[in-house]
Image (cartoon, rainbow, N blue to C red):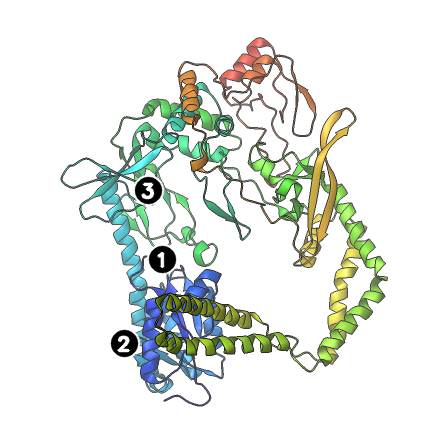
Amino acid sequence: MVGDQKSEARVYLRRSETKQEMSLQDQLKTALGRAAEVGVTIQATLADVEHMQAHHLRRYKDLYLDDGLKGDDLERPAFQQMCQELQSSDTVGWLFCVRRDRLGRPQDIGSFEMALTEARFAQNGITLVFSDQIITPADMERELFSRVLISSVEYKGAGDFLVQHAERVITAQQRLAREGWWTGGKPLYGFARYEFPPNGGPPLKLERGVGTRSAGHHVKVLPDRDDPVRFIALKAMIAWWRQGLGFGAIATRLNKLGVPSPDAGNTRTENGVPHAVSGLWQVNTVKNILFNPRIAGLQDYGRRSEGRLRRTSRSGPRQLASAERKHKGRGKKRRAKLKLNAVEDRIQREAGFEPLIPHEEWLTLVERSRRRGATQEGRRRPKQVQRYAFGTRVFDQTDGCGHPLYGKMRDGKPEYMCGRYMKSRRTECNSNSVDGEQLTRFTLATLREQVSKVGGREAIRRRIEELARGEAERPDDPNELARTALEAKAAEIRQKLDQAPRIILEVKNSSLIKALEKRYAEDERELIATEAAIAKLPPPADRQVSDIDSEVEAALVLFDEIERLADVPTATEAIHTMLERIGLRIGLYFEEGRKGTRPVRKVVRGILALGDYPLPVPLYGEPRVLPAAALDPSLRDRLAAELEAADAGHPGAAAPTIDSGACCRDGHGHAQQVSEVAARRRDDVPVDAADPPAHGDGQESRPTGTVPEGIVPSRAQLELAAAGLEPATPGL
């Protein structure tokens, strides 16, 4: 049944989430069983699936895998790669997939497109094998129209399943919301989920990460009064908010007290690099908690719409409007445009507990906070990386920091400051900063100097030509020795694995049997790693000697660009593009110094890395997390004391205290004089000057204590005006 030319097979596996009925391993088992029935060999095992998941591989041996990707996304990486191979391969003749809905759940015209994709496979001699049917190229050629029609209908049914599922979910969530039950998601900070049985018995608290699927049981989110820290911290946040403190001031107090943020201990991925969350409070974290109506005893369902197929409305599930269908990203990041729903499309009702703050007072505080931040509300901070020549290219190496230095404008000039220091609200690392113009001039001069040291452009041309001609004239694959050694190693391991079962059966000693079984498992893992190393080796490249001159000229263009830009250090966008092409990264080390009579942080040394050469400290450095298990035992008592002081109208121990006329310094060591009232209440301001934008937007910060025209002044600002005092200096 298998031809001589197209005897290879491929298997496509997909799941959209881990809770699916058929796992990836079950899908492969079905494919292997079908392959045995038709006499086709598939180069894959169940261990290969685990290997692909562990190493995030899309293709390995005869397997293609899209893990955690929705079926309506027809741009899935592994699916697209498989389609390209099957429509052009001269050796692959079989495709195994458990069902059509694994290949895709297309929407609208996508059903017909998927049917045509199957037809293209058949035109290239591919036999499609599903769990319930086999479609040969001869079948497709003989019954093309009917086959395309049938597969279109099946794909449409698979796509309609997603739509129907979305409608069922929205309908069920709206019913639960109207009855006052929780509809899913993480509970608000200081709250917990409680499961209520159908017989009216006492509720059961559900710990974080524990779900429930008990029939007739429903969940409510109530204040977690048993939490030793979170509930008291939430009440303290509300009390400080009532006092008039801004979100930045509240975050600073929580950090000074050592209260972990809601996501402390979790992992976040930035720029493709996973790292631990710092555990520090940020302005938006505090804002999102205090702006949540649940603290005022109100449950609000349907505030935002972000579904890709159906969305909520007052009359139930609705289709997306044309303006909402702008998909962003691919794979797991693929989503439609988010929209805030009108109040009449939401479901609001009492949450079933005594509010932590009266609803009317909560509305007043929300309105006050919005008035104070009216000039900044909803304003995006533009990430104009090209505006800064070294955006995402310079890193703080001091004391194992590893964080990027973010670009911002200072006195009209670019400056780069440690991102960890900025994002932690000056509680971690130091105010390590470097002048952007000086860094640009120094780096370009260094690159030019390195080019001159090797003899200039002509010397580089000769060296590149020698390397290119040597590779072009080399008869063997440059990776041949490595490939041969790895294949020999793999063959040796396979031989050991083949002999192991017979040896184990002959052994009578139980301890020796366990040792042999352990060795067998180690050999299996070593074989998987060896085969993965073979798969990563690049294929041999065929290069013609006649193309060498054009390749050399193309390579030299980069050196010409360095020479040209060295004389134009203000061409930031062109410099940024050039540095990106050569993969340049700069690591800087800082230490204490003095400028005149004042202390400053200054650069003492640095390192330039090109291409794949790593910097000494990895990106984001070592994890710096405040785990919940390491909490100070006295934290609850200190929080309770802060809450008592706030209720009594006192500033509390965590409030900033500076003596009248005392000398302070900002992040750059500048001496500043601060009045007593300004120092005591300097956190009560509309914009927090200690929270500069991560990438800078070229806008000058508004001085602390000043109020734009049309904005109601805060209590602290009225105190300043009544006392005839100047506002506190920005950057304090």
Q: Amino acid at mark 2?
A: Asp
* Residue, disc 2: 132
Taking 220 as reference, is 628 left or right?
right
Q: Which mark is residue 17?
A: 1
- Residue 603 horizontal/vertical position (percent): 73, 39
**In terms of sequence position, does the residue under pointer 1 or pointer 3 come before the other?**
1
Residue 434 or residue 301, whichever sits in front: 434
Q: Amino acid at mark 1?
A: Glu
- Neighbourhood count class around disc 3 (C-alpha, 10 Å): few under 14, some 14–19, many 20 upward: many
Taking 490 as reference, is 552 left or right?
right
Taking 542 as reference, is 438 left or right?
right
Mark toward the viewer: 2 or 3: 2
**In terms of sequence position, does the residue under pointer 2 or pointer 1 come before the other?**
1
- Do callouts 2 and 1 mark residues in contact (Cβ within 8 Å)? no
Mark toward the viewer: 1 or 3: 1
- Neighbourhood count class around disc 2 (C-alpha, 10 Å): few under 14, some 14–19, many 20 upward: few
Residue 547 or residue 22, whichever sits in front: 22
**Residue visible at 45% across and 73% down in the picture:** 83
**Residue visible at 73% across and 71% down in the picture:** 551
Would you place residue 289 above or below residue 3 in this image? above
* Residue, disc 3: 302
Disc 1/disc 3 C-alpha distance (Å): 24 Å
> Considering the numbered disc 3 on the image, is that residue within a helix, a strand or a loop?
loop
